[in-house]
Image: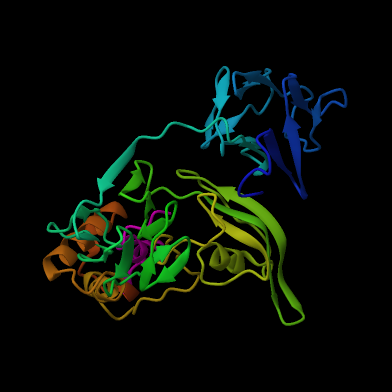
Amino acid sequence: MTDTLTSTAAMLLIQDGPFSYEVPLDAAVLTVGRAMDNGLVLRSRVVSAYHARIEPAGSGHIITDMGSTNGLLYHGQPLHGPYTLYDGDVVRIGDMASGSFVSLTYRNVQAIRAQHRQHYPLDAPTITIGRGADCTIRLDSLQLSRHHARIEQLYDGQHVLHDTGSANSTFVNGLRVSKQRLHAGDVIQVGPFRLTYNGDRLSQSTGDGLLVLAADEVGYQAGEHTILHPLSLIAEPGELVAVVGGSGAGKSTLLRLLTGELVPTDGRVLCNGIAQAPAPGTAGYVPQHPLLHTTLPVAEALTYTARLRLPNDTPPGEIAQRIAAVLAEVGLSDQHQQIIGQLSGGQRKRVDIAAELLAQPAC
């Protein structure tokens, strides 16, 4: 997987089991399948002999299923009929029963999907960003502090970004900052939101808040010991991805790498196509062993968790509302006063999930 193309030509990035490679796309029709007379031959048994056809359409391409057994999946949903490909689209061929997939990632800088964007003019000496009602740019997420950051205009018309002591920090181009002079094209991330600086305004895509997590040949070594051999995967919004393996295979290590708790020693983690782990708080992680005190009632344990996870300026009333909401979401509203240790194993795990949902993670 690559961040950007090295030329304007369209490319197809293939992840076929342990094999990862690029195929250029041109004006010719490309057939995809397991049979050797296809333009693109895939090895996986989930691929039909003649599975799909990719053909040029204007400056882009269209992919069409050719009556295959396992079809084509986009965002976990089957594609019916021709589908127009846009830069960054990931189409999968897979068998749900076995969990085997082949991923086709389309890269074409001339086929950018039109996005609805919200624009925020930088037309005042100071612009405030946060979830507070009095902020110039108000973004609704509990991962943001009420007053998260501010942008000040300098005498020469340029701008400086300040983090104002936020709970989950402010990032520019993937790096945590406390104070940063901005340049055109810089991407500011606050919680799950990405704001692009264009000199006189900030732009935000309406799709913000959704994360595509990818591992690109990610591996991890501790000294001379290999904890996780390099592997690649993509998890898109709304997908259920199962990580299955024997004891000691590296499942927990992989999850910790994807959420940014660990830094890979090989490969890289990509968040929405950018080579960086998710910002703190945007990815929830429920560990194998519970972290909540089993001697506390459910609501009280979640209150302590909320005070640790949510910004310090979150009022008690808002915390109580959030706890009620997550308990309803996991079906434990009636158990809110019950001691955690008295719950069934499945209910205790749902309390752990509720604890992660408190901060409204994007994935």
Left or right for 167, reference 284: left
The magenta stretch is 342-363
Instruction: State which quarter of the image contains the C terminus.
Output: bottom left
Indicate the position of residue 362 as horizontal and vertical percent values: 39, 54
Query: Residue sitting at 53 percent across and 61 percent down?
Result: 276
Query: Taking 313 as reference, is 4 above or below it?
Result: above
Indicate the position of residue 244 as horizontal and vertical percent values: 63, 56
In the rendered image, which quarter is residue 14 located in? top right
Query: Residue sitting at 38 percent across and 68 percent down?
Result: 180
Query: Residue sitting at 34 percent across and 46 percent down?
Result: 203
In the rendered image, which quarter is residue 133 located in? bottom left
Closer to us: 337 or 290 = 290
Q: Is residue 264 shown in magenta?
A: no
Left or right for 284, reference 336: right
Closer to us: 255 or 151 = 151
Indicate the position of residue 263 as horizontal and vertical percent values: 59, 71
Q: Is residue 355 shown in magenta?
A: yes
Left or right for 129, reference 268: left
Would you say the magenta stretch is mainly helix, strand or loop?
helix
Left or right for 25, reference 252: right
In the rendered image, which quarter is residue 97 located in? top right
